[in-house]
Image (tube, grey):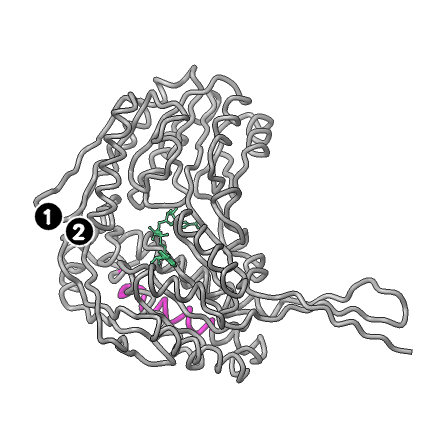
């Protein structure tokens, strides 16, 4: 691990060279219009870089390169064992440049450097290596047909895939999209979130250095409403993979229907239940209940923002969670000791502040935090915040806040816990804590979410799929199941005598 300190990271931040151009057909390129958009450091509010603001015209050029690359077979027909080697080399380069990538991500998103270096950069490398190493171990199928016939079931890449990603985990979410889509032979165009484009731009160059042919991976920074919409309605893009908010995800489904029915897979928002039974290991559950909400400043789709606590231990457990929350002190994200950085920008900060006001107006009790802090830095810091006395009908229990705000709700028995957990438009993640395996399994089985933890929160690795039920989306990232989203199933029926 690194021996970097706040002083050395700060010096590195001063010296870092930042590339803000789009990456099109293997080269850094300005937007055709010459337009740029500033990107700011959430910890200081200061400008980090001007970034190309690509338009639909840039997208059309990139789509043509992507299509040409796909049709040429330079990547799509490359033997899987060779595609594997390129992806593995790319993962190695991401590891070589992990400190630079972590620093870029921290400057762009405000995530603590200990997270970007310890979690995001290694996760990106791991995802790309895993998908690369898996792809030459995938066998096709032969159907159980009658004699004299042979039914081959094969998978083919979709063709050109657009990946539209959010700002909260730019590096790792981008890797979750591009690793399986590239491994399966597609050409991919990434549109990062407008406010956090820097690491996507940099890793595209590393992919090229690893041997990925030109046009196979391109990165176009630019606005969602014009560039993102253009990609989503494009007639020559075959697949769209998206991580972001539920309202935008719904629009993308419509865009697919209005254009060419491109395969559209969505990873959307959440309001995840974290259910604590009286017989849980309360010490561990309290530590993780705080982590489940305050990690990444609550800007996490799977955040356990609804803490659902059995009434017999409610007061005792809330006191324990408040004690644990005291270690989530907002601080400079370049300090390796900081666990909680700023909100990503003024807009997100305002959203959080407005929901704190909503919670108060709905009659919830502000048990901890609730205020802006470190105002002298120019950054968008908000205290970790806990509301008690919440009922599940309140807006702070139903709507995704995407900030460090926990809503504590009481339940009396397992049936009520499940009912509250499922009373949500979302179904992304959740957890249940109980030392009784029957209680834990029964509740876990009934909660309608894509990922459920038993006696852990945020559990999981590359071997398991990730995605949502209900309005948290469709499709799956991670694991071999992700390959399904980026391939078409094809039947070839053969008859012989
Ligand atoms: P967002 O939906 O506002 O933006 C996501 C991306 O979509 C950005 O790149 C944006 O530019 C683009 N976009 C916006 N409008 C568009 C349009 N009309 N057409 C095409 N593209 C458009 O989301 P966000 O604020 O960047 O991210 C936060 C959201 O992402 C939260 O809801 C969070 O829960 C969700 N998220 C989900 C997961 C998951 O895996 N389920 C993971 C991380 C974040």
User: Residue most toward the front?
Assistant: 258
**How far apart are the two marked residues, 2 and 1, measured between alpha carbons?**
7 Å
The image shows residue 30 at horizontal and vertical percentages of 26, 77
Badge 2 element: loop
Is 53 situated left or right of 141 in this image?
Answer: left
Q: Is residue 101 magenta?
A: yes
The image shows residue 394 at horizontal and vertical percentages of 36, 27
Position of the C terminus by quadrant? bottom right
Return the residue nearer the eye: 267 or 300.
267
Instruction: Tell me what residue is drawn at x 26 percent, y 41 percent.
Output: 351
Is 292 situated left or right of 428 in this image?
Answer: left
Badge 1 element: helix
Question: What residue range appears in magenta?
Answer: 87-102
| Of pointers 2 and 1, the one earlier in the residue sequence | 2
Instruction: Tell me what residue is drawn at x 15 percent, y 48 percent.
Output: 379
Position of the N terminus by quadrant? bottom left
The image shows residue 442 at horizontal and vertical percentages of 59, 29
Q: Which residue is mark 2?
A: 43
* Vertical comparison of 123 with 161: above or below: above
Q: Quadrant of residue 326?
A: top left
* Vertical comparison of 460 with 489: above or below: above
**CB within 8 Å, label 2 to label 1:** yes
Q: Quadrant of residue 415?
A: top right
Q: Magenta segment, principal secondary structure?
A: helix
Q: Which residue is mark 1?
A: 377
Instruction: Tell me what residue is drawn at x 28 percent, y 65 percent.
Output: 198
Q: Is residue 465 magenta?
A: no
């Amino acid at each position: 691990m690194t021996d970097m300190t706040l002083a050395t990271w700060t010096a590195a931040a001063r010296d870092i060279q930042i590339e803000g151009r789009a990456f099109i057909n293997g080269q850094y390129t300005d937007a055709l219009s010459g337009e740029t958009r500033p990107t700011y450091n959430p910890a200081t509010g200061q400008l980090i870089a001007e970034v190309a603001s690509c338009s639909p015209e840039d997208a059309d050029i990139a789509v043509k390169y992507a299509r040409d690359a796909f049709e040429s077979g330079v990547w799509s027909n490359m033997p899987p064992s060779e595609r594997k080697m390129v992806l593995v080399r790319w993962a190695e380069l991401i590891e070589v440049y992990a400190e630079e990538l972590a620093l870029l991500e921290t400057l762009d998103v405000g995530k603590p450097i200990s997270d970007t270096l310890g979690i995001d950069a290694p996760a990106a490398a791991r995802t790309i290596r895993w998908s690369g190493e898996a792809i030459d171990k995938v066998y096709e199928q032969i159907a159980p047909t009658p004699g004299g016939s042979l039914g081959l079931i094969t998978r083919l890449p979709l063709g050109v895939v657009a990946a539209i990603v959010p700002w909260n985990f730019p590096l790792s979410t981008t890797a979750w999209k591009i690793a399986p889509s590239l491994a399966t032979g597609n050409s991919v165009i990434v549109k990062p979130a407008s406010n956090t484009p820097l690491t996507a731009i940099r890793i595209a160059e590393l992919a090229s250095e690893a041997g990925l042919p030109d046009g196979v991976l391109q990165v176009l920074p630019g606005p969602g409403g014009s560039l993102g919409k253009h990609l989503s309605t494009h007639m020559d893009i075959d697949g769209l993979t998206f991580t972001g908010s539920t309202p935008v995800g719904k629009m993308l489904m419509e865009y697919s229907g209005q254009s060419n029915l491109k395969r559209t897979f969505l990873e959307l928002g959440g309001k995840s239940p974290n259910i604590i039974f009286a017989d849980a290991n309360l010490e561990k559950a309290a530590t993780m209940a705080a982590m489940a909400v305050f990690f990444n400043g609550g800007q996490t789709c799977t955040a356990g923002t609804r803490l659902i606590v059995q009434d017999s231990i409610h007061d005792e457990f809330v006191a324990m969670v408040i004690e644990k929350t005291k270690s989530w002190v907002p601080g400079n994200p370049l300090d390796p000791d900081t666990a909680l950085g700023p909100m990503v920008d003024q807009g997100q900060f305002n959203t959080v502040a407005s929901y704190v006001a909503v919670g108060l107006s709905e009659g919830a009790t502000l048990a901890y935090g609730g205020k802006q802090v470190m105002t002298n830095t120019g950054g968008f810091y908000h205290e970790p915040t806990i509301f008690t006395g919440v009922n599940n009908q309140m807006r702070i229990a139903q709507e995704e806040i995407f900030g460090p705000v926990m809503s504590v709700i009481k339940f009396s028995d397992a049936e009520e816990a499940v009912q509250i957990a499922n009373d949500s438009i979302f179904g992304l993640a959740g957890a249940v804590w109980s030392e009784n395996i029957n209680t834990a399994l029964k509740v876990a089985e009934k909660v309608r979410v894509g990922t459920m933890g038993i006696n852990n929160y945020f559990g999981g690795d590359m071997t398991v799929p990730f995605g949502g039920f209900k309005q948290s989306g469709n499709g799956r990232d991670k694991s071999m199941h992700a390959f399904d989203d980026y391939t078409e199933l094809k039947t070839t029926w053969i008859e012989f005598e």
